[in-house]
Image: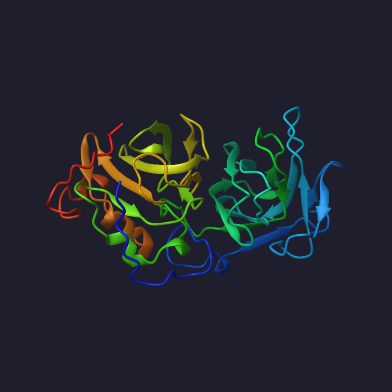
Amino acid sequence: MKIIVSWLAAVVAASLVLVGPADPAAAASTTVDNATAERFIAGSDWGTSAWSAQRHDADYRFATPNLVTSDAAWFKAAIAEAGAHLVEVWYPADAGYNSATPFMVATTGGTRSVVVDQRANGGRWVSLGTFTLAAGDYNVVGVSRWTSQPGYVVADAVRITSSTGAVSFSLPLPRSALPRSEYDDPHHDYPAIDLPVGTGTPAYAVRAGTVTVIDDSSCGRGINLTGTDGAIYTYCHFSSWSVSNGASVGVGQQIGLTGNTGNSTGPHLHFGIRTASTRRCPQNFLLAVYDGTTPPAASSLPTTGCFYASRSAEPVIPLG
């Protein structure tokens, strides 16, 4: 798949914000570092290091993978009010660290697991997604050693931010990844959009729903997300998945990492929306989410006007 690259503006915003234009730091936010007194619990096999300059505060904790027992390290936090919360993690990245570290979030619906590549995106806040948390003082975020991939798993710091009102929609990428101008670009020759981002950029569920994993020569590693509205939201060219086939995901939850798999000539995220077998132009939906307004229903999105008129010999991503 060709990429429509039109870097028309500089990448804006420094933080990873999922929904709307506000900075999550403006809402009620709690940060827990691994050194925060009585807020971090880890077994004796977890070491302490200050080696990486990407660390949060003075040091971070690390451990080798262990497929015998999870031996999770936990961050404890006081959640003042039940409801939707954005959960972010901080860790130093290194090529020798673990590429599939399981982070766990204790939600009202059970423990959710999000796999994070700790070889990338270090030294900044990385979103795990938006989750419904119960009120109380308890272990909210855990870092598990249960991974078959080599390299240290790292536990450094977490940030938990209360959302105002119910969170219904999310951008498919961190808000800091692209300027608004990228979200109205045309696709090649059918309704969809290509979003140019580097390999390893977190991809998020634009709304709550159920995941069907895609793995073929066209889409590469991807996902069909059947939203609670019944529409299908398609993601293609992942470098890896962050959720398993059939998983139920919340809005803003990380579902994969972008890449260059399948029929692709460079790293990017292919994103499409369809209702039944009808492909819809996703641009108006994405622009509304970026602007913090309620997007139009998927069934009302146009089917033309978002792609080039001349059809190429390039294959169309299957509906799946």
Left or right: 272 in relation to 47: left
**Residue 102 image-quadrant placement:** top right
**Where is residue 96 drawn, in percent x and y?**
68, 48
Q: Is residue 219 something one can see in this rendering?
A: yes
Please report the residue visible at 44 percent of the width from the left and 54 percent of the height from the top: 173
Percent coordinates x, y for residue 66 in the rendering: 75, 33
List x then y, in percent, for residue 211: 43, 34
Residue at the extreme left: 310
Residue found 78% across the figure and 53% down from its top: 39
How many numbered circles are shown? 0
46 left or right of 214 in image: right
Q: Nearer the viewer, residue 220 or 37?
A: 220
Instruction: Please name whichever residue, 302 or 78, is drawn nearer the observer in this view of the structure.
Output: 302
Q: Residue furthest right?
A: 44
In this image, 281 relative to 216: left or right? left
Outermost residue on the top side: it is 68
The colouring scheme, among rainbow, by chain, secondary structure or one colour, is: rainbow
Q: Is residue 52 left or right of residue 4?
A: right
- Inspect this view and state whether residue 227 appears: no
Residue 31 image position (x, y, % from top left)? 68, 61
- Above or below for 89 versus 114: below
Q: Quadrant of the C terminus?
A: top left
**Residue sitting nearer the eye, 20 or 219:** 219
At 22% from the left edge and 47% from the top edge, which residue is drawn?
191
